[in-house]
Image: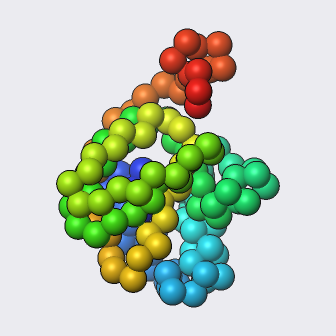
Amino acid sequence: MILHDMLSSKCLLDSMMKGMKHDPKDPQKHLAFVQEMKEKLKQKYQLTDEDQTRHPTMHRTDTCDFSVVVSGEIYLVTDTDETLLKAGDTVIVKGVNHAWSNRSDKPCLMMGVMVHAHPLSEGDPEAAGL
């Protein structure tokens, strides 16, 4: 689910993944894959050392993401918290730094919708607590 908010179409994903080695069971290959995807997609917000310490696939976008866990379970990791989501759970991620972490031995299927949003600035009242 790392790619959930970086890609706008399956065609884009298919064309970008050609020739790329993706092996989620090998942590080093998986991180190399994530980094290569971020470079190809020209990720706007780069990871900081603090982000990588929290979770190596932390990312943030200028979107409001609506996600539903269809099957399995997955952790939503943010700068300050982790929440276990299970089948039937819904989450809204509004431009915050986050990562997805499947810590089970089963796949997790999620469905999501991303809507472009303007980033909040530190002075915005809605930005409190981010």
Where 15 sits versus 39, above or below? below
- The image quadrant that residue 14 belongs to is bottom left
Image quarter in which the C terminus is found: top right
Residue 1, image x, y percentages: 41, 63
Nearer-the-camera pick, 58 or 69: 69
Where 31 sits versus 43, above or below? below
Would residue 3 be seen by someone viewing this image from the given angle?
no
Q: Measuring 71% from the left and 59% from the top, which residue is drawn there?
A: 52
Q: Measuring 67% from the left and 57% from the top, which residue is drawn there?
A: 54
- The image quadrant that residue 129 belongs to is top right
Q: Measuring 54% from the left and 38% from the top, which residue is drawn there?
A: 96
Would residue 13 be seen by someone viewing this image from the given angle?
yes
Left/right placement of residue 1 relative to residue 25 reads left
Q: Residue furthest right?
A: 49
Q: Measuring 65% from the left and 64% from the top, which residue is drawn there?
A: 56
Q: How is the image coloured?
A: rainbow
Residue 30, image x, y percentages: 57, 78
Left/right placement of residue 123 relative to residue 69 reads right
Residue 98, image x, y percentages: 54, 49
Residue 7, image x, y percentages: 40, 55
